[in-house]
Image (tube, grey):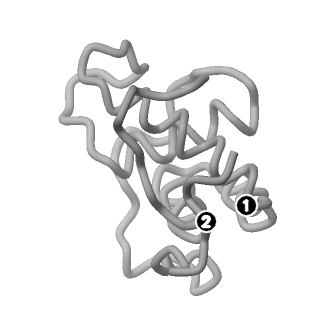
Amino acid sequence: MKGRERFTMHFSISQTAASLWDYGEDVLAERALTMSDDDLRAVQRIAATYEDRTYPLPIEGQRITHNHVTAIAAVAYLEGRLRPMARTRRRPERDRPDRFAPRALDASFDRHRD
């Protein structure tokens, strides 16, 4: 999946893990913490595709946020399939374990390397 032309998404591995945890994907959140930079780039490309409002995502009855898109893209990459999240509503941020605290993408991350 190449993503939308001239549209990119930039988020960190920890942000990916936090998004997964938010929607009840605890096992995948743990896996996300061990992703390589190449894995992260792949998830970012998938997320760029899913940001297209016409792309049929498995979420109904609510506004789709960037957090949803990040989590769904990670599930698609890690499991190789598109499916609904374990939770439809996000968990409270105050309950998020420290290991899933989102941190900004490191400035040294080469976003354009493929």
Q: Mark 1: which secondary structure? A: helix
Q: Is residue 110 above or below residue 113?
A: below
| Mark seen at residue 37 | 1
Which amino acid does the dot numbered 1 rest on? Answer: Asp
| Mark seen at residue 110 | 2
| Mark seen at residue 76 | none
Residue 72 position, x and y percent, is 51, 36
Q: Nearer the viewer, residue 11 or 62?
A: 11
Horizontal side of 86 relative to 60 (left or right) equals right
Cβ–Cβ below 8 Å for labels 2 and 1? yes
Which amino acid does the dot numbered 2 rest on? Answer: Asp
Disc 2/disc 1 C-alpha distance (Å): 9 Å
**Disc 2 or 1, which lies upstream in sequence?**
1
Horizontal side of 106 relative to 8 (left or right) equals right
> Which residue is drawn at the image coordinates 51% and 66% (left, top)?
15
> Which residue is drawn at the image coordinates 71% and 58% (left, top)?
32
